Amino acid sequence: MKIAILGAGLAGLSSGFTLIKDGHDIEIFETQNTIGGLAKSVIFEGCTFDIGPHRFHSKNKDLIKRINKIVSLDVKKRISHIYLKNKLVEYPLTSTSMLSLPFLTSLNIGLDYLKTKLNPFKIDDSFETWVKNRFGKKMYEIYFGPYTEKVWGLKPSLISQDWAIQRIGLFSLWDAVKNILFKTEDTPRTYVSKFYYPKEGGIGKIAKGLVENLESGGGKIHLNKTVGMGFLKNRKKYDFIISTIPITQLLKVDLKYRALILLDLILKEDIEIEDMWLYFPEKNFIFNRVSFPKKFNKNNIVDDKYTACVEIACNFNDKFWNAKKKVLEQLVIRDLEKTGLISKEQIESSNIIKEKFAYPVYDLNYKIKLERAKEIITKMKNVILLGRNGLFTYNNMDHSIEAGFKIKEFIKGFDIKIEKGEYFG
Ligand SMILES: Cc1cc2nc3c(=O)[nH]c(=O)nc-3n(C[C@H](O)[C@H](O)[C@H](O)COP(=O)(O)OP(=O)(O)OC[C@H]3O[C@@H](n4cnc5c(N)ncnc54)[C@H](O)[C@@H]3O)c2cc1C
């Protein structure tokens, strides 16, 4: 069969990897000048940077084995904190982390939780009410509310509770305490303390491994090739089209994606911190997360250069997106200096990466709009939507890869369910 795959992220590449083995004629179209999509790695001054912290994990042991055959993986132990009120508070939340907050704050968290248990919000349909009902008002106000508003650029009362279910994946403050007291078998993703990471080459090595197999089988990848609605008009040229590009590139549909700017920093000295990444929920920091690539793999740095990756969530074409590199750099340095973790003098150079489609925005009406769009595509018969942006869904890397590995079943028209856990990262 002649098959076109739109997008060379993990979903597109693993589909191509699977189909090429059966001798199909595969062509992949990718708008960027490189492969890997959100799971690529970028080399700057010899150092490797991912698109923010990327850890690979799956409940599917076979999937991990298959990836390990394509790329050698190491097991890593997660260490991360929330930077809150000038302190590092353990994340994911534990009873100890809550006790490490100032006494009055911890007391208020406990009291507020009890209050909401006695008198919960009757309508539980937004991120705000979902979190308040399960964690209490105080916990919402100090962490979940501000962090979410920063990442999404939307008031949490306007965000669907689906996001809370996927992102937090833990049912209440009491569950957080229980998880520490009695370690349960079915650990929610947020609590996964170990993960896999390539022995070399950054997370992007997974995509590279898929490409090597695909190209050696005769598959073709066209980089710098943007496709969209026009491509669908000529769909008769192909037996199948597998689209992993944002659904808004394929159809006129009122769905929105949140963009992300990454400021990759080369540092002269190491940072004295154990963490792989830190979350910054407070408004006085323009970034929401900072990660340290060396902590994922020491091969991510070279020649005694040290690195940090700063994430700024924004909207396409807003003041951050359009800001000059120098301006962004100054804002980031201003806020990093407030933490005392990195000083201006420590920074040697920086590189900016922009991702226009980082997060599908789950507003309160997204489901209806998405279903309508999917119906239009289904009627086309030979077009299949796949992956995080293609399906407008909070996918992890393992979900995108697993969907690609099962592409033959999708082509046969089976309704395949990919096990979806909570959102990582
Ligand atoms: C900051 C961040 C941290 C994350 N952390 C983790 C983590 O720790 N663990 C985890 O498992 N997952 C994580 N994820 C999610 C993970 O990156 C994605 O689930 C996965 O990479 C999605 O792969 P995909 O192929 O479905 O989509 P994408 O990677 O988005 O691939 C789509 C491809 O289509 C291309 N494209 C777009 N428009 C066009 C067009 N018009 N024409 C041609 N090509 C086009 C894009 O350039 C891209 O290459 C994180 C995501 C982000 C943003």
Image (tube, rainbow, N blue to C red):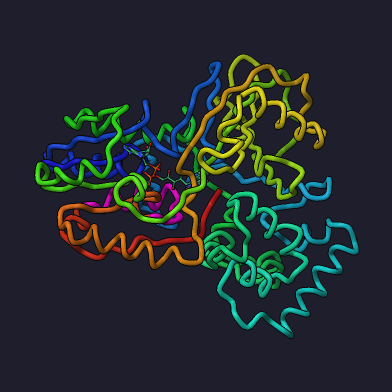
Residue 293 in magenta stretch: no
Q: Nearer the viewer, residue 374 or 106?
A: 374
Residue displayed at 77% across by 57% down: 97
For the residue pair 183 and 124, the one nearer the viewer reads as 124
Could you tell me which residue is drawn at 36 percent across and 49 percent down? 248
Q: Is residue 402 visible?
A: no
Q: Quadrant of residue 133?
A: bottom right
Q: Which residues are magenta?
A: 392-407
Residue 406 belongs to magenta span: yes
Left or right? Give the position of 356 relative to 219.
Answer: right
Q: Residue at x 15, y 53 (%)?
A: 382
**What is the chief secondary structure element of the magenta stretch?**
helix
Q: Give the quadrant of residue 300.
A: top right
x and y, in percent, of residue 282 in the image: 75, 49
Q: Residue at x 44, y 34 (%)?
A: 40
In the image, taking residue 340 as reference, residue 403 lies left or right, namely: left
| Image height of 133 relative to 118, above or below | above
Q: Quadrant of residue 332?
A: top right
Q: Is residue 282 shown left or right of residue 56?
A: right
- Specify whether residue 310 is in view: yes
